[in-house]
């Protein structure tokens, strides 16, 4: 059995949104989400952000959302330890 904590579940949620296959069973993620209100809410937020990013023109992203995404991108780049991602995570937008 995988021991999923909130941090790993949320990382998986982002990967899932990027259509990246992950080795961990979705059922264990779902099991965590059904028992964790925080992660469940985060999934809804991530989904809506990702949907918004796909459907909205780039300039329609609100400053607040852009700031929040930048913080998340920095945190993820830092966590992944990738130097390339660490410099300007938002430059591709
Ligand atoms: Zn959780």
Image: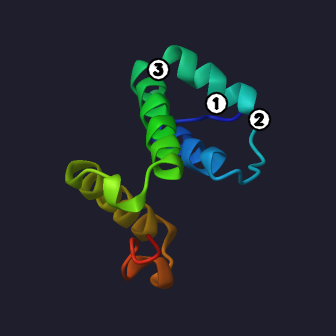
Count of number-bearing discs? 3
Name the residue: 62% across, 34% down: 3
Name the residue: 44% across, 61% down: 76
- For label 3, the SS is loop
Spatial separation of the CA atoms under disc 1 and disc 3: 10 Å
Q: Is mark 2 within 8 Å of ligand 1?
A: no
Task: Identify whether 13 is placed above or below 42.
Answer: below
Quadrant showing the N terminus: top right
Quadrant in the picture for residue 90: bottom left
Name the residue: 29% across, 56% down: 66
| Residue highlighted by disc 1 | 29
The image position of residue 56, as x and y in percent, is: 44, 49
| Residue highlighted by disc 3 | 36
Task: Identify whether 71 is placed above or below 15.
Answer: below
Question: Does residue 7 appear left or right of residue 1 in this picture?
Answer: left
- For label 1, the SS is helix
Which is more toward the observer, 41 or 62?
Answer: 62
Question: Does residue 84 appear left or right of residue 25 in this picture?
Answer: left
Which is more toward the observer, 30 or 63?
Answer: 63
Among the two numbered marks 1 and 3 on one chain, the one whose residue lies closer to the N terminus: 1
Question: Does residue 70 appear left or right of residue 92 in this picture?
Answer: left
Residue 25, which numbered label? 2
Disc 3 residue crowd, few under 14, some 14–19, many 20+, Cα 10 Å? few
* Residues tagged 1 and 2 counted as in contact (Cβ below 8 A): yes
The image position of residue 47, as x and y in percent, is: 51, 37
Q: Is mark 3 within 8 Å of ligand 1?
A: yes
Quadrant showing the C terminus: bottom left
The image position of residue 9, as x and y in percent, is: 55, 38
Disc 1 residue crowd, few under 14, some 14–19, many 20+, Cα 10 Å? many
Among the two numbered marks 2 and 3 on one chain, the one whose residue lies closer to the N terminus: 2
């Amino acid at each position: 059995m995988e021991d999923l904590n909130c941090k790993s579940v949320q990382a998986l949620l982002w990967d899932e949104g990027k259509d990246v296959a992950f080795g961990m069973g979705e059922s264990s993620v779902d099991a965590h989400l059904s028992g964790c209100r925080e992660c469940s809410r985060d999934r809804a937020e991530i989904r809506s952000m990702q949907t918004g990013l796909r459907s909205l023109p780039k300039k329609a992203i609100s400053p607040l959302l852009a700031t929040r995404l930048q913080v998340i991108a920095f945190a993820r780049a830092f966590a992944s330890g990738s130097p390339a991602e660490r410099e300007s995570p938002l430059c591709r937008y």
